[in-house]
Amino acid sequence: MAGAPDGGTVLSEKMLAARFAEVVLPHLGDALSLARWLTGNTADAEDVVQEACLKAHAGIAGFAGGNPRAWLLTIVRNASYTWMAKNRPRSVVAVGDLADLDDVSPPPDNDADSPEAALIAKANSAAVEAAIARLPQAFRETVVLRDINGLSYREIAAMLGVPQGTVMSRLARARGLLMTELGGRHEPA
């Protein structure tokens, strides 16, 4: 094999690229969504997801199976906090740019034919997004991981490095805060 590249290495690189495509690429939408919630805007989220993809590519050989979505979202979470520690002062809390999440929100029901119903649905969605953005960080990430990304309590506990009971407690408290904040908006007539 003098002067020729190692065929095994090339094959291995092709296999790793295929594994990356299989494990990571189907979950890029969820990765971007999580990064948006954690960073507060699309541009920063795209930077974070790019960094997370580089880390996932570098570590794809070490992926031992299991839930690839949870694996990638763990990398995205860690990349988000690393990126924010480097690029944002601790006193800055980004809650702007939530309008970018409109494309993630479900469209209004087809039964809602009136423009008024569509406007109410959009206002309600914006209110929920803003309320989630105002939650303390630990509660916000738990709600996003469970209610938006659909991860199990066990997956969230492993991702955050906390007991499963802590995940359930944070989720209950976060939902309670959201219900309190959003419940006051709709007083009976």
Image: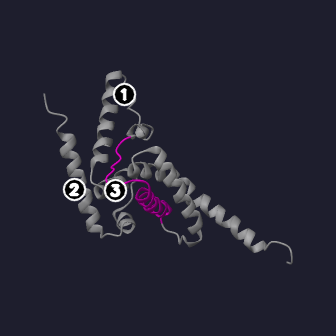
Crowd around label 3: few <14 · some 14–19 · many ≥20 (10 Å) = few
Tag 1: amino acid: Asp
Q: Is residue 54 shown above or below 61?
A: above
Name the amino acid type tagged 3: Arg
Q: Is residue 41 left or right of residue 46?
A: left
* Occupied quadrant, residue 151: bottom left
Residue 166 in percent (x, y) is at 26, 66
Q: Badge 1 is on which residue?
A: 111
User: Extreme left residue here?
Assistant: 189
Residue 88 position, x and y percent, is 40, 53
Q: What is the secondary structure assignment of the residue under circle 2? A: helix
Q: Secondary structure at mark 1?
A: loop
Comparing 123 with 85, the one in front is: 85
Q: Residue at x 47, y 62 (%)?
A: 75
Per the image, the residue denoted by label 2 is: 173
CA distance separating discs 1 and 2:
33 Å
Q: Nearer the viewer, mark 1 or mark 3?
A: 3
Between the residue at mark 1 and the residue at mark 3, the CA separation in whole angstroms equals 45 Å
Amino acid type indicated by mark 2: Arg
- Determine the main secondary structure of the stretch shown in magenta: helix
Q: Residues within 10 Å of mark 1 (few under 14, many from 20)?
A: few
Q: Is residue 137 magenta?
A: no
Please state the extent of the stretch shown in magenta in the rendering. Answer: 67-96
Q: What residue does disc 3 label?
A: 90
Q: Is residue 70 magenta?
A: yes
Q: Which residue is pictured at 31% across the width and 47% down the height?
A: 133
CB under 8 Å between callouts 1 and 3? no
